[in-house]
Amino acid sequence: MQHCGIGGIGAVTGYGWGRESFWNGLVSGEVAASPVERHGPGRDRTAWVAKVPEGGEEADGPSRFAKAMRAAAREAIVDAEERGWRPGRRVGLLHAAVLGDLPSWNDFYGRRGGDVPVRDYLALMPSTPVSMLMQEFGFHGPAMNVSATCASGNAGLLTAKAWLDAGVVDDVVFVATDVSSTPETVLHFERLGVAVTDTEPRQACRPFQEGSRGFVMGEASVGMVLSSGGTGHYARVLGGAMSHDAHHVTSVDPDAAELRRCFTEALADAGADPSRVRYLNAHGPGTRQCDRAESGVFDELFPAEARLYSVKPLVGHCMGAASAVEVAAAALGYDRGIIPAPQPVAEGHPRLLDGPTPQADGLTLKSSLGLGGHNSAVVLAPADR
């Protein structure tokens, strides 16, 4: 088993197009969401959503989905090359996506009545942006999509590491994309009682704090280059695990048995004792059941000096791209010596980080809990470990 390094990062988020916009937004404590107009039965009002703004290259496709996916991947590849990466013969591509290019599908069935040129129809396929990116860079390893609801980012990272461990590839470009915050999607997450749209994000989403009402929805595409060799890495992925509650279509199993097993198996896979964990970069959506489950397992397993945080109050809950966004925040934090944690606004867990904090030595466990019972955990370490 090999430890794989994160050697390049690209990001398109509600903060804008580019890795530095993402990082600067996080460390400044600025929220990525803003009030946006939405229309339709029962939703003629503004809603706080961290949407990816218009932008990108026209040649990358007709939609924000394709443009964001290819921009994030391209930025990660260029970044990795500038940090010393040289692609191997077999570069694979993994794309984490859940709902896909919803705005374009809405347009296809609604405004255009399903009658479009073949080229436009092919652009709707989740495989098309993947294939176009492989063609752009001349990569010849395996290429596929990964989907595990909100745990998709962790699932993609663990799949990439499995490919590297098995010798299937020399390197992996991993991308996670979600631009699904259409008015219809936001409405249904409101109906589920987990999304909040009527107030500023830090007041609505208070992970591990009193008065939290849920999360503000967000969008993002994040790219990373993963390899088992080379230098110039931001951080290393030591291992990880996934499990499933098999309990309920939306709710977390209250005894958290499978989440606990996921954490312990992730540490075993990484060859790491719980005493080495310094941070839990939590799923932390600000919902009562998720926060209770994660903080409970955190308190059971990790030492007194360990701390926890969630960046969702700032960047929003980016659904299929959520854990990739949050891994990128942790990896950039290792590289730059700062954990970009948001500042709490209410009484909360005694080990919750209080705003941006100097990075201490130790491991980070990044957890993500996906809708329907998906549990995932990835163990991250500084690049020199």
Image: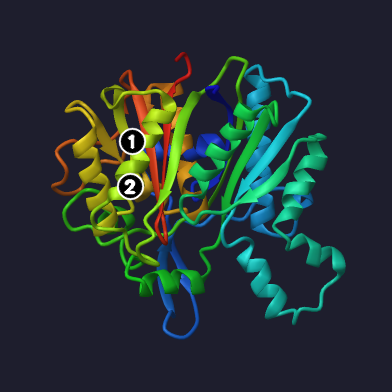
Q: Position of residue 289 (x, y in %)?
A: 26, 58
Question: Seen from this angle, which residue lies furthest right?
Answer: 118
Compared across the picture, whether 22 is left or right of 339 comes to: right
- Near mark 2 (Cα within 10 A), the count class, few <14, some 14-19 or many ≥20, is many
Instruction: Say few, some or many: other residues with alpha carbon within 10 Å of mark 1 (under 14 / 14 to 19 / 20 or more).
Output: many
From the viewer's perspective, is residue 100 above or below residue 94?
below
Mark closer to the chain start, 1 or 2:
2
Judge by depth and name the residue closer to the eye, 204 or 132: 132
Q: What residue lies at 16% left-to-right and 28% top-to-bottom?
A: 304
Image-quadrant location for residue 8: top right
Q: CA distance from mark 1 to mark 2?
A: 9 Å
Q: Is residue 161 above or below residue 244?
A: above
Q: Is residue 241 left or right of residue 16?
A: left
What residue sits right under mark 2 in the picture? 259
Q: Is residue 109 visible?
A: yes
Q: Nearer the viewer, residue 51 or 383?
A: 383
Q: Nearer the viewer, residue 213 or 277?
A: 277
Specify the amino acid type for callout 1.
Thr
Instruction: Give the image location of residue 24, x and y in percent.
Output: 44, 35
Q: Amino acid at mark 2?
A: Leu
Q: Which residue is mark 1?
A: 264
User: In the rendered view of the protein, which quadrant contains the N terminus?
Assistant: top right
Residue plotted at (69% across, 53% down): 66
Instruction: Answer yes or no: is residue 27 visible.
Output: no
Q: What is the basis of the colouring in this image?
A: rainbow
